[in-house]
Amino acid sequence: MATIIVDNKSYTVDERQNLLAACLGHGLNVPYFCWHPAMGSVGACRQCAVKQFKDDRDQSGRLVMSCMTPATNGTRISIDDPEAKAFRASVIEWLMVNHPHDCPVCDEGGECHLQDMTVMTGHVYRRYRFPKRTHRNQSLGPFIRHEMNRCIQCYRCIRFYRDYAGGRDLNVFGSHDALYFGREQDGTLENEFSGNLVEVCPTGVFTDKTFFHHYTRKWDLQSAQSICPHCSLGCNTTVSERYGIVRRIANRFNSQVNGYFLCDRGRFGYEYVNSDKRIKRALVRPERDRAKPAKPEGVPQVLEMAGDRLRHARGIIGIGSPRASLEANVALRSLVGPQRFFQGVDEQEHQLISTILSILRTGPVPSASIRDAEQSDAVFVLGADLLNDASRLALALLQSIRQQPMERVDELKIPRWDEAAVRNAVQDRRGPLFIAGYQHTWFHEYATDTYFAAPDDIARLGFAVAGTIGQGAPSVPDLTGEVRELAQRIGDALTHAERPLIIAGTGSGSQATIEAAANVAWALHHQGKQPRLSFVLPECNSAGLALLGGGSLNGAFESIRRGQADTVIVLENDLYRRADQAKVDAFLDTAQTVIVIDSLEHPTAAHADVLLPAATYSESDGTLVNQEGRAQRFYQVFVPDGDVTESWRWLRDLARAKSQEVDGLTGVATWGNLDDAVSATAAAAPELARIGEVAPSARFRVVGQKVPRQSDRCSGRTSLISHLTVHEPPPPVDPDSPLGFTMEGYRGPLPSPLISQFWAPGWNSIQAVNKYQDEVGGPLRDEMPGVRLIEPVGTKAPHWFTAMPRAFQPSSREWLLLPLPAVFGGEELSNQSPAIAERISPPFLSLHPSDGARLNLEDHITIDLALQGTTYRLAVHLESSTPVGTAGISLVPELSGMRAPAWVDLFEAIQTERTRRVA
Amino acid sequence: MLSEIERRELEDAVKSYPDKRGAAIDALLTIQRRRGWISDDSLLEIAKFLEVTAEDLDSVATFYNLVFRKPVGRHVAFMCDSISCWIKGCEQVQEQIKKLYDVDLGQTTSDGRLTVLPIACLGQCERAPAVMIDQDVYGDVTPEKIEQIVEKYK
Amino acid sequence: MERPLTQHIHPDGTTRTLREYVKEGGYRCLERLAAGLAPKDVQRLVTEAGLRGRGGGGFRTGTKWSFVPMGPDAPKPKYIVANGDEMEPGTFKDRVLMEGDPHGLVEGMILAGYAIDAEIGYIFLRGEYHLSAQRLNQAIAEAYAEGYLGKPLPGTGFRFDLHLHASAGRYICGEETALINALEGKRAVPRAKPPFPQTVGLWGQPTIVQNVETLYNLPHIINHGADWYHRLSRTQDGGTKIYGISGRVTNPGWWELPLGITARELLERHARGMADGVRFRGLLPGGISTAFMTEEHLDLPMDFSSIPPEIGRLGTGTMIILDDQTCPVGFVLNLEKFFARESCGWCTPCREGLPWVAKLLTSFEAGRATSDDLSLLEMHAKWLAPGHTFCGLAPGAMAPLQSALKYFHDDFERHITSGGCPWSRKSAQRRILV
Ligand SMILES: Cc1cc2nc3c(=O)[nH]c(=O)nc-3n(C[C@H](O)[C@H](O)[C@H](O)COP(=O)(O)O)c2cc1C
Ligand code: SF4
Ligand code: FES
């Protein structure tokens, strides 16, 4: 700790910071542009100038850039010094030389860092009277709009895109005052994190194109805190709405999870909420004839009918969902009883996740948060395709490879925030990152070593690595020399690290890779290291659902087949994505009554006798548990129209309708608000006991007030429905949370789960998050970053996994079909968002070139593939990274019903003559 | 496509640097010597050779004024416009060129013969004003002499 | 008067051959290395000689070298780079040396490399110096053939490799950290200091960037010693300097002279006074990043120590003369247009401020300026100061402007009051190229 003196007051600061960060951390306003808490200092914009004095006798001082000056003990500076102020105003004046006067039509207006800084510095009068330079804008794809004239040349965009996120197709061109930030030619920005440009750019050069399509000023947005539902990582977001339309997603800082950045699937996947395919009305099929369409009915009638059917059912089973909240699943479990509650995932997934749970529960190695991943100094990925399946984690690993080279930086006494100097010192040096997988992505270019092989071979490599680390971990006897050497290299790198991280996942369907990962981590643990494990799971609440327990989908099928039940309630789940069509058909046809609660139309919903429109994550509250085991709360943003309501409320109403009694209700039927749901959830399983600590309860008030979802400048409230009535309707009541659907309420400091939009006086852009941290870049003040539900129980010797698969043997006729996750296209909900849909690549089958030759297939031709009862049309990709004897299949919507891994006879499955060529 | 000889020259250029990317500027100038300028296609070919993206290379290419990203004439006249030459009347020389060949700074004659570009001090200040045509430097240039000089370049 | 750097340069512009070079004492100091002169001895000699960088900054070469990590644990490789970018307008001294005596640079580089134990050298040459490139390439090839390069030097085990990099333009490449980026094949944007290139330079390795003329001094210091070197100069800075004069003088050119000669001697004796019909008004002592000096400063010794900082600095030692027939505002406009065009575009004050200054000066010339414009010029001169901008380019650009506002204030005023350029309304119109 150091003491610095700012304008004659002392402040205690961390001497490892720069002065800018130190001042911001104490709430002092110093304007800046090029510095970013996650990306460090480069000293380009010169906006953060302050006066530095040698000692207390020094009266004149000199201007320094606060972002480039360390906060060493005894530093004396002045922010208010007239010369410093005048200089900072001049910097704005220079930046404004070419900046257009288009705030009124600029999407950034009202949340523009440049606007804020301009006001802060007090530059008000234009003295530049010459023409401004202008630029042509580029068309950058469905996510990002480009308006180069607004650029202030802070270089943040390319520093984020290239240096931080590993992107290559955005750069700066030209020199002097003719600089252009863009692509070499028009075209879609390729990087999976391009959406962060919207927040990283301090002005309106890069703006959210999806937001543009239904634009609303920031202050007119009604917002709530949310958790991204589009993968298992649980990034924190702010979802904003107006007039019943979700308008956009912004990053919501959580120091342990997503920090400052989201992936594009998470940021742009939200539009499914506004989709035409939304189920808005409760439907019933009165005659038990599935050929006839279900019809809308009044909710009371629907419930009555459903209740009637439930009362007369010969057994009700419930199928839960890994994409529904814990509370919704608990509600279903309560309705049908734990024995008749099934997790709604297939047998394989069920098995993999329970293995993972038991590894995390019983082994000595804890799971890693994304923050931990960023900090790890050696990483080994077994079989998981992070870029496509857990993108934000891949972004974290791009930072982790900077950890080891930082030793050199420290030796050279370069402060870590001095990004420009760090990059010069580090050059191309990278810390260890080993990736074993079967689909090549650009992320592999950052790896120390890659290994492309079938899952069994990846597992064997993993077991071998554990073996080289020793400590009793079993080794693999019959390895080829090459793999043995690779295993040795990986083992050495991991043992040389302090905080190694081992990552595996369910994506490849391989149990062995998961077990191998555990062996590696455990071996490292016994070496005295502080390893972490990270398992990528399929969906946003896969972990929560697994903690709750319940059998697999097969069990559900069985109980209907055996006649143990005749009524099914399917919660937010399209079974056709999880089992063969024939099986699901048989299941649904056999069931007497099928009740489906979901938000989007899908084949399962089409089979429903009773279809209840579920609220999406932006229309409901609930808790999700991410792959780390961290429980986090998401909040309702707005009250949806139609019959849409929370799944748990439907289930409660079903329970009430079923029992028909007013008194003597039990379980879910007694729930009144979310607090009841949360309490019931806490009681549902021992590990869920702390669920109530995730966020304040609905009773939480500050000075008797709720927390508003709208900004206090929200305009036009009284005229919102003036075409219907001139009376302002009372705002909807929210019984479930401390939030209100209004602009009235408490606006002071809040526990972090209740902060929906970061705002502070003078700080209208998202950079206001600085004002919510004691140390910029550090945790939010009073941060409640969620509750980790699974911690290792002890350090006892693990039971090593010993079931090592045999080396993968290609077969003569059959190929092992391997699932290839796709960041765009691989997730059910985001696929329905138009911007994401534009980025989904056509389905393909990827083969090793030698297999292509064996099958007489050329690269890029189109084939018809008859598989599992369906015929798919797809393109052939010949990739040398695809292991021989395997065939990768992209998990895009057209192929969502396909089951993989599976062995298929491609000679037979490829039916038609391959005639057409794809460009 | 890079010709055999271009590829060999590029491979030569790379030898002076620890990595291929280091040779980016040499590579651009090498290909420009052969092709006169760096077209988008040339840029892509060089980028491929250097194993960098088009953005990587163009970011470098557009920074430097001696890399031409637009076509130039068969000959390029670099007119020093820095201070010593300015004192000694480079503007008059330039006007003379305009009169004779109908080209302004930054333009190419309609017959594609000559591109006229401004250039920072050519280091010939003791014999200002100076002009460099292709690789030949001329000092003590006057409006009267310039035609004779340019006429050597057809 | 001794002229160690240039006495053997052919007056007819042809190059000094390897044969001549060796016959006249070239590469001889390599024998002294073989005879046991250790790197630290070379460093000591250079420090004692008081050699100061000739690239414009006048930094003490010995001091600069002392920051390079030495010894067996020092990072490898280290680099030595010759800064042959010479794009400072008015400056042409390095060209004279490289064209006339290419082997001198090769030898200087070997010595500098030896002194800091850097086994790889680059000559960073501005792209327009085709003749220098050709002659240096030949010299390098010859030095390889002779075994001065590419093989362990006899008796030392030190082996040196030397490459020539021809630049693709841009004045900022002369700034040493921008130069390093350019050598790495990147945009020539300067790097923040610290860390200095001596510890983190080319490809992150310890690197010394040294002006070409500085390097030419090394063999002579090694051969003749520090005392001899001190005696060459008239002042406490050792050695000779290549001075030059351009502008409207009778005999523009360059001369190797003892450091500390006065501007008056240079102007009157060597340049033989002002050209017919023009009178002296001022001079920029060494390139355009230095402040104007006027009549009253003509008797200052032109070296690194004798010019008071409030007056200016020597810079590159190649002077540009402003005469009374040339408009000082137009003169400064020409400079600022240069600087605006050559800004790398990294930091705000330089990128946005310089073009504004150029546009303001253009309005002065066009007779559209107001007294507010004068204060805007002054504002820029004040703000674009060292430390306020990322590198030295913009402060360099302000040196002539600020001093012009001081010495030629009346001329600026006259542009406002007379509604145009008093020197030539017509030529002023022509110069509007915004
Ligand atoms: C904008 C700018 C341009 C420069 N141009 C040159 C140059 O062309 N040649 C040169 O030797 N030094 C130039 N320098 C100085 C170099 O940065 C560096 O100080 C010098 O090469 C060191 O060599 P020396 O110590 O031998 O003088 C320039 C500096 C700045 C700020
Ligand atoms: S586009 Fe935005 S982020 Fe990039 S340099 Fe310009 S202002 Fe900065
Ligand atoms: S924030 Fe400090 S220079 Fe840009």
Image (spheres, coloured by chain):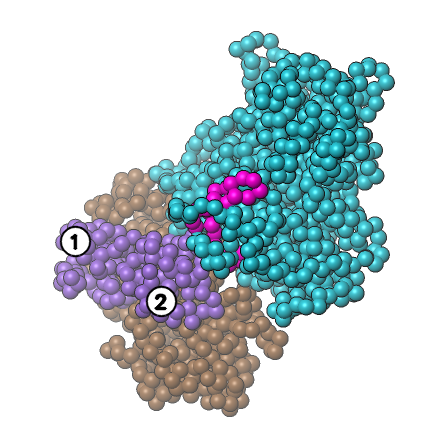
Chain colours: A cyan, B purple, C brown
The range drawn in magenta is A860-882
Q: Nearer the viewer, residue C245 or B23?
A: B23
Q: Residue A864: say if magenta.
A: yes
Q: Residue A427: say if magenta.
A: no
In the image, residue C310 sits, relative to residue A486, either above or below, namely: above
Mark sitting on residue B111: 1
Which numbered disc, 1 or 2, marks the residue closer to the eye? 2
Chief secondary structure of the magenta span?
strand
Residue A790 position, x and y percent, is: 78, 45
Q: Residues within 10 Å of mark 1 (few under 14, many from 20)?
A: few
Q: Chain of mark 1?
A: B
Residue plotted at (74% across, 58% down): A803
Residue A552 position, x and y percent, is: 72, 39
Residue C287 position, x and y percent, is: 36, 62
Tell me the element at label 2.
helix
Q: Nearer the viewer, residue C337 or A677?
A: A677
Residue C329 position, x and y percent, is: 31, 50
Q: Nearer the viewer, residue C233 or A781?
A: A781
Tell me the element at label 1.
loop
Ligand 1 within 8 Å, label 1 CB: no
Q: Earlier in the sequence, mark 1 or mark 2?
A: 2
Residue at the spot of label 2: B7
Mark 1 on the same chain as mark 2: yes
Q: For residue A127, what is the image quadrant? A: top left
Mark 2 is on which residue type? Arg
In the image, residue C172 sits, relative to residue A703, either above or below, namely: below
Q: Is residue A201 left or right of residue A609?
A: left
Mark 1 is on which residue type? Asp
